[in-house]
Structure formats: C-alpha cells, structure tokens
Image (tube, helix red, strand yellow):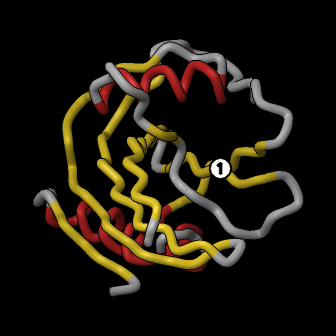
C-alpha cells in the first residue's frame, strides 16, 4: 500500500529567475516547500517551510495548481500530492540557506527548461503557467 504525502510547494520568482532547491550533492532540483503537518493549512505549511529552509519570511500570493505523482523509493511506493502556490520573499538582500543539507539556485526560465526537476510534470506545468496564467492539475506515474 502506498504512503500518501501532501506537500505545499512554492514558486518564487525574482528578477526573471525562479528559486529551486536540491539536496547537497544531488543533481535533481525540486520546488521549495514541504509536508503539511496536522493542524496546518497548505499556505501555513509553505510559509513555515520557507522560514526553516531559507530563514525568510514569505507571503503566499495565490494558488497556481496541483501535481499528483506516484513513484517508488527505497522499495516503497509513494503517492504524492503537491499543492503549488506563487509566493514572495519579504526580505530584500542576500538569501541565506538555513538547512545544511540543501542548496539553492536561481534559474532563468530557459535554465529551468533544461534542468532535471522532480516531478517533471510539475516543472512543465509551472513553465506553462507563466505564459498562460491558468491554474493546472498534472499527474505523473499513474
């Protein structure tokens, strides 16, 4: 039986670049965010995760879409639901990574197209959203 995970993810864009993160030494990117904990709304979870990961206060601007994917990791099937929001970082200045196991990168839209981002369908939906500005629902692995 699959583990079901509900995750809030943020799309942060500044000066034409989108912020992505990855585990140190890992080539695969993902959009910042994390698991929604009991008693939290998705926006609350996202703001908490951004504070933990970047040490930054953030503001959720709007819901932009959802991504559902299924994959196997460590011999376990995972069913992941990602709720995706456009967010803004509230502090100006240099961004400081707070969690030692993560590294961050600001990518242009062109660089994002070429980057390895999981889930792939979410990367494609975010890029499409920036031209169409219509909420999305995408699936992968079903």
When the figure is inspected, residue 54 is found, relative to residue 109, above or below; the finding is: above
Q: Position of residue 97 (x, y in %)?
A: 75, 29
The quarter of the image holding the C terminus is bottom left
Q: Position of residue 69 (x, y in %)?
A: 38, 72
Tell me the element at label 1: strand
* Extreme-left residue of the structure: 134
Q: Position of residue 20 (x, y in %)?
A: 59, 51
Q: Residues within 10 Å of mark 1 (few under 14, many from 20)?
A: many
For label 1, the residue is: 21
State the residue lying farthest toward the front: 1
Determine the residue positioned at 22% across, 65% down: 131
Across the whole image, how many numbered discs are drawn on residues? 1
Q: Is residue 72 above or below residue 12?
A: below
Front one among 1 and 119: 1
Q: What residue is drawn where x is 15% and y is 65%?
A: 132
Query: Is 93 placed left or right of 124 in the picture?
Result: right
- The residue shown at (20%, 35%) is 62
In this rendering, would 124 be left or right of 111?
left
Q: Position of residue 4 (x, y in %)?
A: 40, 58
Task: Write down the quadrant of residue 76 in the picture.
Answer: bottom right
Q: To which quarter of the image does residue 22 belong?
A: bottom right
Q: In the rendered view, would you say 65 is above or below 92?
A: below
On the picture, is 141 further left or further right than 115? left
Q: Name which residue lies at 36% across and 81% down.
A: 140
The quadrant of the image that shows the N terminus is: bottom left
Nearest to the observer: residue 120 or residue 39? 39
């Amino acid at each position: 039986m699959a583990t079901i995970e509900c995750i809030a993810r943020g799309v942060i864009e500044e000066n034409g670049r989108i912020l992505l993160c990855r585990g140190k030494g890992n080539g695969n990117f993902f959009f910042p965010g994390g698991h929604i904990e009991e008693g939290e709304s998705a926006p609350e979870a996202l703001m908490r995760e951004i504070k933990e990961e970047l040490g930054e206060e953030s503001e959720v601007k709007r819901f932009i879409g959802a991504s559902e994917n299924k994959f196997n990791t460590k011999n376990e099937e995972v069913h992941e639901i990602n709720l995706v929001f456009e967010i803004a970082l509230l502090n100006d200045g240099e961004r400081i990574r707070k969690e030692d196991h993560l590294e961050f990168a600001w990518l242009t839209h062109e660089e994002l197209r070429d980057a390895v981002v999981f889930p792939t369908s979410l990367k494609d939906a975010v890029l499409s959203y920036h031209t169409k500005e219509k909420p999305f629902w995408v699936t992968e692995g079903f």
